[in-house]
Amino acid sequence: MGVLADQERTLIKSLLPLRRQRMSASPFAFFRGSAVIMAADLATVPVTGLRVQACGDAHIGNFGMYGTPERNVVFDLNDFDETLPGPWEWDVLRMATSLVLAARDLGLADAAGGESVYGGVQAYRQAMLEYAAASPLTVWYDRIDLKRAVLTLPLPRRGVRRTLSKARKRTAEQLLPKLTGGSQPHFVDSPPTFQRIGLDSQTAEQAPGAQTVRQKPGAASAQALRTLSPA
């Protein structure tokens, strides 16, 4: 918990009660909000030495379906605020752990969580084998075919089709009206998580979290790893 307390010193103090409330909802909610703790744990885990631009917070809740500018629907990561260079194993381990906790959060048996982990890791391994034999362009343009994936699901598929239909509309154009208003579009405050802080530049420079905002993405996790990794 000391790692979490150290991180909170860099955050906006007025939002800490809301953060703690959300994290206390369930073990899975705590897991989602405490990437820095797992980063500290993973710093001691043996790795192969192959480094990638890791997501840094690759739990199941940070994957989703959304529409691209080309009007395709993709299933992919949608949260990169903890991205940092690191071993590829970290993302896989966080993803696998999240599957177990998500299954418990849904009231499923532990066996269901175990099967999800096995299936997910197996699919990852198979995809890596295929990518290793493919050209860089083939890997770049590869996508999960959601329409085909839906056909492989057991009946009924009605709920999944509704989700897929909503995902087609989940674009930047659809999001903009929810965040802005007025004849001259401007961001509309939605306290306490989305609002202007109303500080002049000098005061804003000294505001809690100001330094953190300017750090590169993944700074919190990276700092934990620098502190805990062996020299």
Image: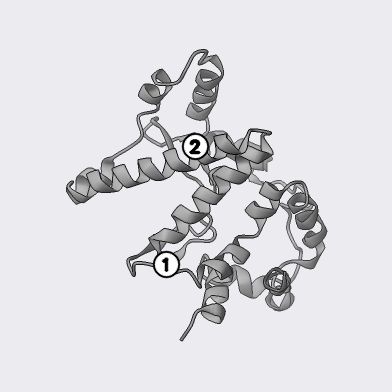
SS under mark 1: strand
Point out residue 50 in the picture as x, y percentages from the top left corner. 32, 66
Number of labelled discs?
2
145 left or right of 162? left
- Residue at which label 2 appears: 115
1 or 2: mark nearer the eye: 2
- Which of the two discs, 1 and 2, labels the residue nearer the N terminus? 1
The quadrant in which the N terminus is found is: bottom right
At 39% from the left and 25% from the top, the residue drawn is 149
- Vertical comparison of 103 with 209: above or below: above
Point out residue 56 in the picture as x, y percentages from the top left corner. 50, 60
Whether residue 58 can be seen here:
no
Picture quadrant where residue 209 is located: bottom right
Point out residue 141 in the picture as x, y percentages from the top left corner. 27, 41
- Vertical comparison of 97 with 182: above or below: below
- Vertical comparison of 95 with 173: above or below: below
72 left or right of 167? left
At 50% from the left and 49% from the top, the residue drawn is 95
At 47% from the left and 17% from the top, the residue drawn is 154
- Residue at which label 1 appears: 86
Is 155 in front, or is 111?
111
Badge 1 amino acid? Gly
SS under mark 2: helix
Is 2 in front, or is 196?
2
At 61% from the left and 41% from the top, the residue drawn is 102
